[in-house]
Image: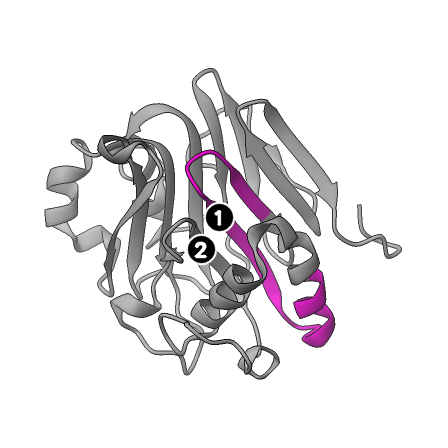
Amino acid sequence: MCRHLGWLGADVTVSSLVLDPPYGLRVQSYAPRRQKHGLLNADGWGVGFFDASAGGQVPRRWRSQAPLWGDVSFESVAAALRSHCVVAAVRSATVGMPIDASATAPFTDGQWLLSHNGVVDRAVLSGTSQAESVCDSALLAAAIFERGLDELGETISEVAAADPNARLNILAANGSRLLATAWGDTLSILRRADGIVLASEPYDDDPGWEEVPDRHLVEVTATGVALTPLDHSEGYR
């Protein structure tokens, strides 16, 4: 499992999203409050953002296999990194998966940044090519990129049908859209005056955080937030 966060809105510092909040990703790397599977997220971290100097559509990444709580080099520059669109994650590696930077989200196809919070049987993704790593999350990211993010909901539903035990919380952004799925783990929205946060769990105690129902797709654009059910089976909202 992991914890991840996405931002779409005004230019803000990466530090204000990841490091500064009282229960931000740095704290979630050693003391998550709502994580259902695993106790720590010490198997790496990654931050991706869209570069304003390149028109706001070019993704940049900084990834590491080390725990976020001990990375002083990132802390020293995070306050100087600004973007209108950010995807960040801390990782708890699935048993048997490699622990290295290439296996750490966010993954990219050159246009999108994508993080996976969950687990999936690699056998159902065996035909996928162009993955950044052999880990399950990288293979899933490659499958999503190949099919296209416009089909994210359909892709997640099909993967879940092939692997009923999969947990498939996805977070993806391309600089103008922020997409997410809630499938098997927590996801929350914070509607701020300057933008929208999607996160595995709230990074503070603001009463404005809203929980996303399980098996839903979330799309954030400049025009607002839309939630779409991904499963209409009895027992799911």
Image quadrant occupied by the C terminus:
top right
Residue appearing at x 30%, y 26% in the figure: 12
Q: Position of residue 8 (x, y in %)?
A: 44, 31
- Looking at the picture, tell me which residue is in the foreground, 76 or 28: 76
What's the coloring here? Answer: one colour
Segment colored magenta: 157-180
- Locate residue 71 relative to residue 12 in the image: left or right: left
Q: Which residue is mark 2?
A: 115
In the drawing, what numbered circle is on residue 205? none
Q: Which residue is mark 1?
A: 172
Give whichever of discs 1 and 2 has the lower sequence position.
2
The extreme right residue here reads 234
Q: Can you say whether 199 is above or below 138 in the image? A: above
Q: Is residue 176 magenta?
A: yes
10 Å neighbourhood of mark 1: few (<14), some, or many (≥20)? Answer: many
What amino acid is found at the position of numbered circle 2 in the picture?
A: Ser
* Circles 1 and 2 in contact, beta carbons < 8 Å: yes
Q: Can you say whether 137 is above or below 67 in the image? A: below
Which quadrant of the view contains residue 122? Answer: bottom right
Q: Is residue 198 magenta?
A: no
What amino acid is found at the position of numbered circle 1 in the picture?
A: Ala
- Locate residue 154 relative to residue 102 in the image: left or right: right
Residue appearing at x 36%, y 70% in the figure: 132
- Looking at the picture, tell me which residue is in the foreground, 74 or 59: 59
Which quadrant of the view contains residue 5? Answer: top left
Q: Position of residue 81 (x, y in %)?
A: 20, 34
10 Å neighbourhood of mark 2: few (<14), some, or many (≥20)? Answer: many
Q: Say what secondary structure mark 2 lies in.
A: strand
Q: Position of residue 226 (x, y in %)?
A: 67, 33
Residue appearing at x 22%, y 63% in the figure: 66
Distance Cα–Cα, label 1 vs label 2:
6 Å
Residue appearing at x 74%, y 51% in the figure: 230
